[in-house]
Amino acid sequence: MANFELKMPKLGESITEATITKWLKQPGDNIELDDPILEIATDKVDSEIPSPVEGVLKEQLFKEGETAEVDKVIAIIETEPEDGEKSDEPAEAEEKDEDEPSAAKEKVEGKEEEKEEEKDEEKDKEDKEARSAKVEEKDSRKGEGDRFYSPLVRSIAKEENISTKELDSIAGSGKSGRLTKDDLLAYIENRGKKAEPKTGEKPAPDKPKAAKVHVGEKDEVIEMDRMRKLIADHMVMSEDTSVHITLFREVDMEKVVRWRNMVKKDFLEKEGEKLTFTHIFVEAIARALRDYPMVNVSLDGHSIIKRKDINVGVATALEDGNLIVPVVKNADQKNLIGIAKEVNDLAGRARSNKLKPGEIQGGTFSLTNFGTFGATMGTPIINQPQVGILGVGLIQKKPVVIESADGDTIGIRHRMDLSLSCDHRIVDGALGGMFLDRIAKYLEEFDTGREI
């Protein structure tokens, strides 16, 4: 038999590790090709790891809840050797040489067996020591709580005599509050210094702490799951990072509604996909971002990063009540059919927990459709490090004034409210207003004669 080392796969450019949340196969279980072996979680997405080989699960090298770095061996699978491959099992003894005395041969073979046993014992001892060291190294990279610290951060902290308790107290700017090298170096530079207020200037007040919440006898306390914790932390971080402003615009959806009702049946029969308003919104956003590229940016301190690609994230509600934002890459280069197929595919796999980490990374602008759930208007929170997010409300029939050359009349039209939340550090009212108006114009001037 041969042993295959299953390694933690690469999960995206910025992902260096993942937490093993559940083993789907146990030692001794048979494994078919592409069978899911375990479930993993990163700070971006949960996913299953399929088996690249057939065999039997021999050993799990990490427990559930432990974190493994990319390319680390996480399991051993015992496989059948291919033709011509050397087997790990001892070969059958060769036929006895009649010219060699049997007693002498048995003595030699006995010594060889003893040597092999000693080697096996030594190897087992080394493996145990290596695993023990790996667990100790992993544990040393966490604080007194569950906060993760990279080896580089740990090394710098050790050189500067910074304790784990002190590390835990330093605010981090990384994902989910992770402490980065730059955070630590900035802390070291200002360590021990106290900002003295200028003459006549009052010191800035500390950020108020959340009020203590009383729990009554009849109340039920429910612990957040991992994804909800990440969402909560990300939203708080976004509010602390960006200066949010929200702009509103009512848009006439009559042409869009009429065209979709006319083609949706043929679209389903021809393309095998449902055509929704979300697909049309993504198309309008992508075109408007091309017209106003300074909304398709990110901020790094006082530096503006102008994104070359237009990647639209589409907020997707999951059955467990959580939210995930898969990304339509290069949305401005796709036609409506391409957008519809990609959005439907991403949303479907998001709800069945089949998204790949790279499919929720790299977004440059986001869309959230709370009209799907009956809300007419909202003020969405920016998905960092983007600087804008569009919210679309419920489409409703309303009486409106219709202007014409022959005079004004009252008519019934399909109307919808758009809300654009943007980062006022870079997108001011003028830019935000023009961008929002451009999206509205693309919807109001929709070509009802276009073919699918």
Image (spheres, rainbow, N blue to C red):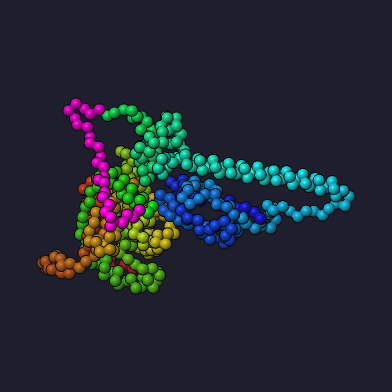
Q: Is residue 33 above or below residue 267?
A: above
Query: How far across and down, in percent of the image, does residue 391 sit?
Result: 27, 57
Quick one: which residue is furthest to the right in this view?
A: 99
Q: Report the magenta residues as a range.
A: 196-224
Quarter the N terminus occupies: bottom right
**Would you identify the image quadrant in which residue 354 lies?**
bottom left
Query: Split into 4 quadrants, where in the image is the C terminus?
Result: bottom left
Is most of the magenta stretch helix, strand or loop? loop
Percent from the top left, x then y, of residue 347? 38, 61
Residue 409 among those drawn in magenta:
no
Question: Residue 90, position in %: x, y?
Answer: 72, 52
144 relative to 396, above or below: above
Q: Residue furthest left?
A: 407
State the residue at coordinates (31%, 28%).
Answer: 193
Name, please, the residue furthest toward the top: 199
Q: Nearer the viewer, residue 325 or 223?
A: 223
The quadrant holding residue 250 is: bottom left
**Image point (39%, 36%), residue name:** 165
Give the left or right position of residue 63, taking residue 372 as reference. right
Magenta stretch: includes residue 216: yes
Q: Is residue 282 left or right of residue 10?
A: left
